[in-house]
Image (tube, grey):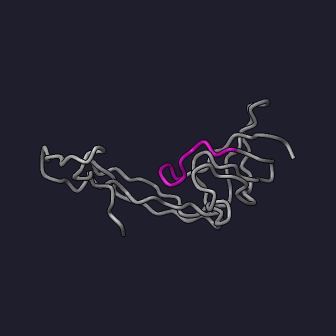
Amino acid sequence: MARWHIRSQRSPTGRLMHRIRKKRRRDRGLEFVETRVQERTVKQQRALGGSIKVKLLAEQTANVVNPKTKKVVRSKILTVQGNPANPHYIRRNIITKGAVIKTEAGLARVTSRPGQHGVVNAVLLEKS
């Protein structure tokens, strides 16, 4: 596992920055979870303070809200149509916040963070 989250020793201009305190384990942050379109798989992880975070590794359904009728429907995810985070995520069917997914209800934009929240919530864009 790559641990590149720790602050750099250099500033953006190149000068050497002196540390204010020792490094802490919590400064590293967490690894990015690539949520795929497959049968639902979750992983629980201990967070700061002993709380539990639910990491969504794979999901095949989404909570899709229709903005006109204000109704929420649980719909099957067919594929990922677009992803502004990374163009390669479309080919690999990886869901992140802001991704456009094709569901049985139609095209929808993901509003939740699946790797952090453990659920896929989306808003319907158009009816197909």
Q: Where is residue 122, by image quadrant?
A: top right
Name the side, left or right, on which 100 lies relative to 45: right
Q: Going 45% across and 58% down the picture, which residue do you hit?
A: 32
Q: Going 53% across and 59% down the picture, which residue do you hit?
A: 56
Q: Position of residue 8 (x, y in %)?
A: 26, 52
Residues shaded magenta: 109-118
Name the side, left or right, on which 119 lies relative to 127: left
Residue lying farthest to the bottom in this orientation: 1
Q: In the rendered view, would you say 125 is above or below 52?
A: above
Q: Say if the magenta span includes residue 112.
A: yes
- Position of the N terminus by quadrant: bottom left
Q: Say if the magenta span includes residue 60.
A: no
Q: Going 14% across and 47% down the picture, which residue do you hit?
A: 19
Name the side, left or right, on which 70 lies relative to 41: right
Q: Position of residue 46 (x, y in %)?
A: 34, 57
Residue 6 versus residue 101: which sits nearer the camera?
A: 6
Q: Position of residue 118 (x, y in %)?
A: 52, 53
Residue 5 versus residue 96: which sits nearer the camera?
A: 5
Q: Position of residue 69 (x, y in %)?
A: 79, 31
Q: Going 34% across and 50% down the picture, which residue do you hit?
A: 51
* Tally of marks: 0
Residue lying farthest to the right in this orientation: 128
